[in-house]
Image (cartoon, helix red, strand yellow):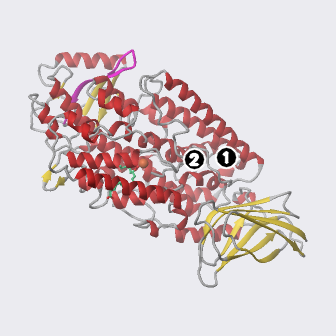
Amino acid sequence: MGKYSVRVATGDLFLAGSPNQVQLWLVGKHGEADLGTQLRPVWGKEEFEIDVPLHLGRLLMVKLRKHNVLLSVDWFCKWISVQGPGTQGEAFFPCYRWVQGHRIICLPEGTARTLSDDPQNLFKKYREQELEERKKVYRWGSWKDGLILPIAGNRQPDLPRDERFLEDKDLDFSVSLAKALKDMAIKGTLDFINCVKRLEDFKKIFPRGKTALAERVHDSWKSDAFFGYQFLNGANPMLLRRSSRLPARLVLPPGMEDLKTQLEKELQAGSLFEVDFSLLDGVKPNVIIFKPQYVAAPLVMLKLQPDGRLLPMVIQLQPPRYGCPPPLLFLPSDPPMAWLLAKTWVRSSDFQLHQLQSHLLRGHLIAEVIAVATMRSLPSLHPIYKLLIPHFRYTMAINTLARSRLVSEGGIFDLVVSTGSGGHVDILQRATACLTYRSLCPPDDLADRGLLGVKSSLYGQDAIRLWGIISRYVEGMVGLFYKSDQAVKDDLELQAWCREMTETGLQMAQDRGFPISLESRAQLCHFVTMCIFTCTGQHASNHLGQLDWYSWIPNGPCTMRKPPPISKDVTEKDIVDSLPNLHQAHMQKTVTDFLGRRQPVMVALGQHEEKYFSGPEPQAVLRQFREELAAMDKEIDVRNAVLDLPYEYLRPSMVENSVTI
Ligand SMILES: CC/C=C/C/C=C\C[C@@H](/C=C/C=C\C/C=C\C/C=C\CCC(=O)O)OO
Ligand SMILES: [Fe+2]
């Protein structure tokens, strides 16, 4: 018994408060006290003192219930803090959720607890009830067969309240999209009348406020070194790999002996690299306004020079066909327009695999599976829930928007992208079928692709560095709550989470290396590091480059309007006629600007304000994480200052804490 001081924090946004009255209970180890309806959480923080005649013992939980006489108004509760008997100075009850209706909500004290940390089962019932409720609210959906699962729901209102954009993000997204579409409507009216006659005519839609790097792309896109550089550090750094043999598909027709000699020399020296777009082979191209579009499946062979430049040696635009003559090979020594058209075809193919495989699937959709599996399997008390939850913000919302406006029937892909109208789904299905656990973990992925230690792979260096920082953060937190491998094995909630992710969310992905159980702290740390890296660095390194590399349309054509060339007799007009028309280019530029712009409503990696963990030790681990991120950020700044082409996409201050766009 005694006097308690209670503080209640409402969200900072204008619509976070509620005029409804809120009733609170204090739940201790030895009793429960109804504090009555002390609160009307309209704005900011409220506090009150109250005498409780009961002996409650150590405070375990706060319960709250919103009362609505006429109108129920949702209330965003950030946290509740209590001082008084049984609080060891202050007991902190994190919430960071919407309180809806008038159900009783339980907020456990912020100390993270696994099941084994609760030997008296003080929270067991609460954990079970919470997960039962979460499984009703967070349901797996289905978008297309053969893909990993999304959250159920087709539009924002279908999503759980806590997953929708808050008003600041919603306003920014809606206003920016409306502005982009208005600009498109105004400037695009003439698109069907005007046409592009020369490559430089694409300057007409080169965006205002373009980035310095986008300028460089416009100036240098034709150069071989610039073309090769993009596979290392461009919008899509995920396809390049060191060759271990000459690719079987690379059939060298008679007269190409010199090339064979050069390729073998680079292969022997370990400096031969390849980018193989075979995943696109046979994909049905889109038809846009009755006009067929075209898709190719190129192979590019490149040599890594001692000075770090990656130079193309040969481009094969389509794989060999049985019973047909070997495909034409394009060389740097070919007539300039023929070589440029071959490179442009590669750029358009890279756009397709980048946006669908590297960005949407391996960034957005995997992050969504991690979020949904976690919400369905881990109670808010669980340390791994507390570690991961900041990295899920807005992911279900942005992905639902992507499914309804980008890759939907009649969406952007159908309107202006060569793989739209079904080819994009085929690509996603093929990419899902070959998605491995190792490919989501940079130390494994870069080793498998032969990129570890390649000095000119700035993406690789920064990905390894960031993975290491996240890994130490995860190890620090896991070490606080799991004192042995057996403790990991014994955590049934954790095992259910891992299985839900691999078997359900990722659709039986154990065949591709994903674990269906966690047998050790090391394995748990690797898996959780993959989760956080995917939701942050993996997405950022494949999202942030859009504005730089796709603003100049010929460097990232969303579609090709003529078939791949079968001769080297190519003119600039052939290239212009192959590239997107003005309307398609305008739409690409509108979407690129809209998606690629730097987000004003942005939480950088590790900088979330929510305090999910109570106690000095988790706070210390988070502080160390932030210090290492700050050090990396500063060192990247120094490195970039002396680079001709800075690499910024894995700078911690540029990496969002979750997938939100
Ligand atoms: C052409 C760009 C393709 C990108 C696919 C990769 C990832 C998805 C993307 C998320 C997009 C989310 C929502 C898109 C919403 C609107 C799209 C813009 C204009 C729509 C026009 C309209 O609906 O009228 O990652 O950032
Ligand atoms: Fe994105």
Compared with residue 480, is residue 232 higher up or lower down, i.e. above or below?
A: above
Circle 1: residue type:
Val
Magenta stretch in the rendered image: 303-317
Q: Note whether ligand 2 is within 8 Å of mark 2.
A: no
Please check the rendered image and state whether residue 285 is part of the magenta-colored stretch, yes or no.
no
Residue beneath the point at 41% across and 28% down:
450
Q: Secondary structure at mark 2?
A: helix
Q: Nearer the viewer, residue 107 or 633?
A: 633
Q: Residue furthest bottom?
A: 70
Direction from residue 635 to residue 91 in the image, left or right = right
Residue identifier under label 2: 528
CB contact under 8 Å: marks 2 and 1 = yes
Binning the other alpha carbons within 10 Å of mark 1 as few (below 14), some (14 to 19) or many (20 upward) gives: many
User: Which disc number belongs to residue 478?
Assistant: 1
Q: Is residue 423 shown to the viewer in this render? A: no
Residue beneath the point at 43% across and 53% down:
365
| Image quadrant assignment for residue 196 | top left
Compared with residue 178, is residue 616 higher up or lower down, i.e. above or below?
A: above
Q: Note whether ligand 2 is within 8 Å of mark 1.
A: no
